[in-house]
Image (cartoon, helix red, strand yellow):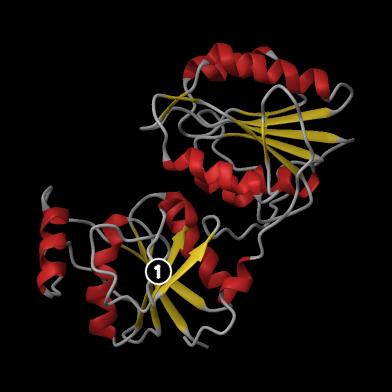
Amino acid sequence: MKQILILNDGRMGHLNQSIAFANYMGYVYDIVEVLPKYRWSKILTYLFDKIGIKTDILFHPVVLDKQSYSLVVGTGSWTYYMVKVLSKKLQAKSIVMMLPKGYRYKGFDIIFAQQHDIPPSYHNIIEIPANFAYIQPQGLYKAKKKSVGIVIGGDNKVFTMSKEKLKLQLDAIVKQYKGYEIAVTTSPRTSKEVETLIQSYHFEYEVIFSQHPINPIPDFLDQCECVCITGDSTSMISEAVSYGKANIIVLPLESSQENKFERFVQSLEKEGYLHIFDESIENKNRKIDFRTYLKGLKL
């Protein structure tokens, strides 16, 4: 069986994409962290890549469990250069799960690039509608009757989560799904203020991540009739449109300018994968089968 070496930059949303790829391929994998030695390591990786230098001197040593791997896979900007370095060292194929902006596309065997990043047409780029996601319910949540799941994120570099706007959205969901069991989870980025708002509703099932760091989202997708997700996380939304039968509703957040997150959600709505909440609720539950993007690959 082929072995995959997955490079981890410390961001779970990135790591999960690489693991999803390995799971869909049915290959075993090892995970190693890639840690820069210096604050300016990334700047030099762009220069080194441009002039064709492949060296690991900018990173702490990577200790490998094995000396033979068929594929080296990375997601996130801290991994891209080291994917090239280690794939050359191991004589393995190099694969990245997002568009490696700032690096030469030449030298990667396969680049999976999300449509909202507007990737160029290039021989090794495979355009995909969302982040690779592989869902496995964990049994953390078990619905007792017809149910609705709500997934709450938080502020990021683009969006601000307004407690007042979120309350209006939650009130509308509660009204629309009167009589349903409502299950809610927050995330690592959810503010204390928003956590307090969530707790004030006394929902039937409630996970406050800062107090109980578990992830019931796969179970929501498996059991709920509808799952509502705030629009700040492409990873959470990608999971939602790739598994189960639930209708997906995205709760928009406030932003000061057009951004890739909004392009991402708008493109998925256009294709029938989800509905962007606009004080109305529509049932949209088309799902992405990521295996279709792997057919015919020679790895």
* Amino acid of disc 1: Ser
Tell whether 253 sits left or right of 143: left
SS state under label 1: loop
Which residue is found at the position 75% from the left and 48% from the top?
A: 285
Which residue is at the front of the view, 14 or 35? 14
Which residue is found at the position 57% from the left and 58% from the top?
A: 133
User: Height in image: 281 above or below 245?
Assistant: above
Q: Position of residue 119 (x, y in %)?
A: 40, 60
User: Height in image: 208 above or below 269?
Assistant: above
Tell whether 4 sits left or right of 23: left
Which residue is at the front of the view, 86 or 158? 158
Q: Residues within 10 Å of mark 1 (few under 14, many from 20)?
A: few
Which residue is at the front of the view, 50 or 2? 50
Q: How many discs mark residues in the rendered view? A: 1
Residue 243 appears in the picture as rendered: yes
Tell whether 252 sits left or right of 143: left
User: Height in image: 43 above or below 47?
Assistant: above
Q: Position of residue 213 (x, y in %)?
A: 54, 37
Q: Position of residue 48 (x, y in %)?
A: 11, 67
Tell whether 255 sits left or right of 45: right
Which residue is at the front of the view, 31 or 250? 250
The residue under label 1 is: 121
Residue 37 appears in the picture as rendered: no
Which residue is found at the position 72% from the left and 38% from the top?
A: 227
User: Height in image: 216 above or below 69?
Assistant: above
Which residue is found at the position 55% from the left and 57% from the top?
A: 129
Q: Position of residue 49 (x, y in %)?
A: 16, 68
